[in-house]
């Protein structure tokens, strides 16, 4: 009898809990009266979050401009490589703009710190940061999110745009990956 590892996903936040948090995040962002706001969503992980947040912002009375910054720090697995690289830069001139950076997960902090420094180096006037999920116990770099959807412990999560090896992005909820020993 051999033993194999099967991956299963345990639900952490369902679709309605996420929708509720996204609405609250939008209200908090909207309360900050900024005129020339540009949302910069970090790809790929924040694309679903960004789409929902844009609509929630509109319901909160904010018709925001959006652009995308594609960064890479992870390979195929679940461990960060530690180096962040720009795969595709924002096309908008960010000089003088008030930027709201969106990321799916704030983990070691390298990605958000890199994005912040990158946009400031291009002349952004101010940076506000939003993380759908914060894992504060994992921080390696000094950076914080001004707005956080959910705080969670050190577990690997997937769904709602977030992947593991490019899988699970289409799940309508956020779950925690569990490796179960299964007999076959
Ligand atoms: P950081 O640079 O270590 O803060 O990592 C941020 C990026 O790593 C996130 O934008 C995700 O793309 C990825 N990441 C961190 N933790 C997880 C996870 O639990 N699941 C999937 N991706 C993750
Ligand atoms: Mg990401």
Image (cartoon, grey):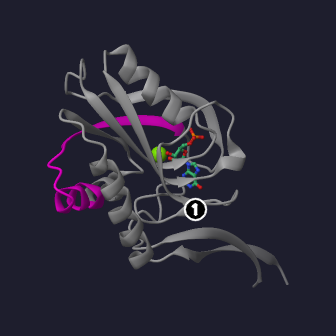
Relative horizontal placement of residue 58, taking residue 176 as reference (left or right): left
Residue 110 lies, with reference to residue 64, above or below; the image says above
- How far across and how far down the image is residue 35, in percent? 18, 35
Q: Secondary structure at mark 1?
A: strand
| Residue at image location 28% in from the left, 30% down from the top | 98
- How far across and how far down the image is residue 139, in percent? 67, 40
Relative horizontal placement of residue 176, taking residue 17 as reference (left or right): right
Relative horizontal placement of residue 104, taking residue 25 as reference (left or right): right
Residue situated in front as seen by the camera: 21 or 49: 21
Residue 60 lies, with reference to residue 103, above or below; the image says below
| Residue at image location 85% in from the left, 84% down from the top | 1
Give the labeled residue for mark 1: 157
- How far across and how far down the image is residue 60, in percent? 21, 59
Q: Which residues are magenta?
A: 52-73
- How far across and how far down the image is residue 141, in percent? 64, 30
Name the image quarter holding the C terminus: bottom right
Residue situated in front as seen by the camera: 55 or 42: 55
Q: Is mark 1 within 8 Å of ligand 1?
A: yes
Residue situated in front as seen by the camera: 103 or 158: 103
| Residue at image location 42% in from the left, 62% down from the top | 169
Q: Write down the quadrant of residue 33 in the picture.
A: top left
Residue 116 counted in the magenta span: no
Relative horizontal placement of residue 54, taking residue 151 as reference (left or right): left
Q: Write down the quadrant of residue 119 in the picture.
A: top left
Residue 73 lies, with reference to residue 114, above or below; the image says below
Residue 58 lies, with reference to residue 140, above or below; the image says below
Count of numbered circles on the image: 1
């Amino acid at each position: 009898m051999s033993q194999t590892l099967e991956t299963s996903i345990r639900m952490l936040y369902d679709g309605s809990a996420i929708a509720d948090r996204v609405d609250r995040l939008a209200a908090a962002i909207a309360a900050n009266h900024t005129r020339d706001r540009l949302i910069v969503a970090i790809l790929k992980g924040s694309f679903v979050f960004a789409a929902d947040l844009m609509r929630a912002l509109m319901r909160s009375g904010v018709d925001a401009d959006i652009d995308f910054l594609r960064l890479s720090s992870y390979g195929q697995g679940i461990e960060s490589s530690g180096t962040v690289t720009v795969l595709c830069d924002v096309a908008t001139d960010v000089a003088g703009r008030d930027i709201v950076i969106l990321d799916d997960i704030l983990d070691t902090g390298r990605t958000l710190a890199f994005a912040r420094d990158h946009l400031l180096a291009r002349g952004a006037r101010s940076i506000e940061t939003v993380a759908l999920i914060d894992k504060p116990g994992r921080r390696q770099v000094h950076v914080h999110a001004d707005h956080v959807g959910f705080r969670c412990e050190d577990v690997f999560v997937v769904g709602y745009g977030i992947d593991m090896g490019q899988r699970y992005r289409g799940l309508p909820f956020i779950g925690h990956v569990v490796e179960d020993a299964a007999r076959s």
